[in-house]
Amino acid sequence: MRSQPDTRRTPTARLPRAAAAVGALCLALSACGSGDDTAPDIGAEDVAAALEEGGEITVWAWEPTLDRVAEEFEAEHPGVTVNVENVGTGDEQYTALQNALSAGSGLPDVAHIEYFALGQFTIAGNLVDLAPLGASELEGDYTPGPWGAVQGEEGAIHGLPMDSGPIALFYNQDVFDELGVGVPTTWEEYVDAARELQEADPDVYIAADNGEAGNATTGIWQAGGQPFQVEGEEVTIDFSDEGTARYTDTWQQLIDEELLLPVTAWSDEWYQGLADGSIAALVTGAWMGLNLESGVPEGAGSWRVAPPPAWDEGDAASAESGGSALAVPVGAENQALAYAFIEYANSGDGVQARIDQGAFPATVADLESPEFLSAESEYFGGQTVNEVYAESAANVREGWNYLPYQAHANSLFNDTAGQAYVSDTTLAEGLADWQDASVRYGEDQGFTVTTGD
Amino acid sequence: MTSTTTAARTPHRPPKRARPRGRWTGWGFLAPFMAVFALVFVAPILYSLHLSVYRDQLVGGTSFVGLDNYRSAFTDPVFWESVSRVSLFLAVQVPIMLFLALLLALALDSGRLYGRDFFRISIFMPYAVPAVVAALMWGFMYGSRFGLVGNANDLLGVTLPDPLSPGLILASIGNIVTWQFVGYNMLILFSALRTVPHNLYEAAEVDGAGQLRVITAIKLPALRGALVIAAIFSVIGSFQLFNEPSILRSLAPNAISTGYTPNLYTYSLAFSGQQQNYAAAVAIIMGLLTMVIAYAVQLFGMRKAA
């Protein structure tokens, strides 16, 4: 999940006693900075002991709802200090985490990692297997998509799902009403609506897109494409399937007719566009609701949520965008307490605290609870938005994979496919270039990469 | 005769014993410097050399590959494209910047400018702005939707060319760098002008030389050394271009690729792609290349001076 950089931080209480306790725990458990093995040197009983004993952990996350979770966790367990630090959103955080892992120091105890980026850390053995700490007992508590994303080989569990991102169409009802344009239910209607909005007001765009890997992969996913296949160290990258073509044909029209606002997501201009109505809609993960509330407060009452536009009329097939887990990096100092916090935040009472703040969880019990589904969102004009998200979650297309090095591949998207947005290169050609670049990197990294037919 | 021999002999004796001690005393005085030098200059370079002969893969781990990384770098189109991009930048931006700096320095030195100190400090001021802040600030101004360019478009009802488009982005970066460093270079040139002895000007006046003649015959030759220094700094600066493209990338991701400049490329390789080893090889090649070109500029400058 992505949200706007949040600079709030839990005040750091530097209790010497807590630090000493951490040190003592480290010595006793010899779990600090130990080897390459992802299996923890501790067990479930140590987690309970760590809670008793107290201590200090550092959490690297940009998820805004975690601050309150940390406060409540501290209140429940005296002697425990949780420092939630925002070291950057998405890629920035992964870069920082990779650097800390390479350096072997300065590691957080808990790291916020999107599902698509888990691969690059697990393949290098960078994340602690949480199964022996109690995570294996949580199977069935989560929806299949997110649970599949955190599972590794041989029953390893690399993190606990924090949220999921079934896609939905977020749209500014006031703008659509004012300009007399109907809200699209299919992608064909979407392209028409994009044209109509532009005709009615040249400053209004149906979407902001400056070439973003996440948008493209989600779009291809929903259209039924499966460009990435991963079997251990064997990777297939193939952007020539039918689903991908469906996506590129539609998107090429939007690009050619200049129906997209060329503004990068999460930039200041982007927020301004969402606030002043020049970005009328966006198709993205359910977590966006929370970001609209916090990032575009002036949009309260104007925005609504609808199922994502369908590729065929009546086809409810959906996809995921983002969604993330909390994980423990190998070498983290206080792994027992780290796991205790993750379990609290993503399985225990912390989940409700996050739902109350507008998060979309990955826990089945919460997703199915009538209370959750019937909750009316004030921001979205009293709409029961969770129902829309839950329906989308149930219709997510199966069989999608991300590359084990998706985060880096995504960073190459603008070098290649992004050129379609600023030059004569077509999106299909751009994706072919992206494929080449991703294949080259995969081979350099020792994967066996095939490109399909 | 005798006095000279004794004088020569007496100091001659003690050194026999003292020489070894003296040698070590010298090193002792040098030691603090040498320690720091070894730690912050030699060690990182050696470490980079060490890194550059290995390869670390996600699958397969670390292995010794000899000069393979260098071989790939020499045939890496992304790398050479970035090198030619900064070379173009060097060839266009540096002369413009130095020419402007020269004009400003001559204007300040002419003594005909009102508020000379004010001009000097305000032209120098951008140099005091951190590069990251400067790039962010210019990024806001370049924005054609909500930035200054956008405001100008709305106000005047025109469509100015987008400074962040692929065709113009290099010029836009050049503009930022010029804005930032013209004052610095001006100061180097200006201080060189201040060292010209005053009697030369008096002599020129007696000979009936005009201002233009004074500039070409006295000031420019006096500036040659300073110009060479400024040019070398600028060569190194251009080849190390990083902050501006790195900051503007978030605004123009399609115009500035991950391998836009050699430094940006090394950064992407090392920190996004986890290819520290290859990045080290690229950095070393780039370092050597910069040295060669800076040295060439120096030789060229010296030859002209002679």
Image: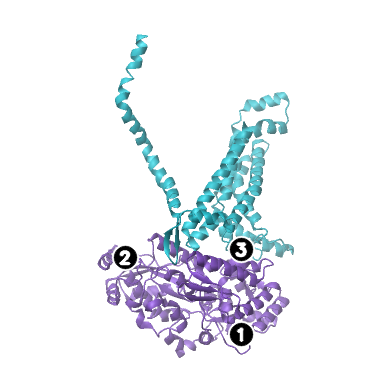
Check the residue under mark 2 and report the chain it is in. Answer: A
| Colour-to-chain, cyan | B
Q: What's the residue type where badge 1 is placed?
A: Ala
**Labels 1 and 3 share a subunit:** no
Q: Is residue B280 above or below residue A198?
A: above
Which class describes the residues within 10 Å of circle 1: few (<14), some (14-19), or many (20+)?
Answer: many
- x 45%, y 89%: residue: A368
Left or right: A329 with respect to B280?
A: left
Q: Residues under labels 2 and 1: Cα distance?
A: 50 Å
- x 61%, y 80%: residue: A242
Check the residue under mark 1 and report the chain it is in. Answer: A
Which class describes the residues within 10 Å of circle 2: few (<14), some (14-19), or many (20+)?
Answer: some
Q: In the picture, residue A363 is in which quadrant?
A: bottom left
Q: Residues under labels 1 and 3: Cα distance?
A: 31 Å
Is residue B61 visible in the rendered structure shown here?
yes
- x 61%, y 46%: residue: B182
Q: Which residue is mark 2?
A: A32
Left or right: A313 with respect to B278?
A: right
Q: Secondary structure at mark 2?
A: loop
Q: Colour of chain A?
A: purple
First along the sequence among labels 2 and 1: 2
Q: What's the residue type where badge 3 is placed?
A: Ala
Is residue B188 visible in the rendered structure shown here?
no
Q: Which residue is mark 3?
A: B252
Q: Which mark is in front, 3 or 2? A: 2
How many numbered circles are shown?
Answer: 3
Q: Which mark is in front, 1 or 3? A: 1
Q: What's the residue type where badge 2 is placed?
A: Cys
Q: Secondary structure at mark 3?
A: loop
Q: In the picture, residue B163 is in which quadrant?
A: bottom right
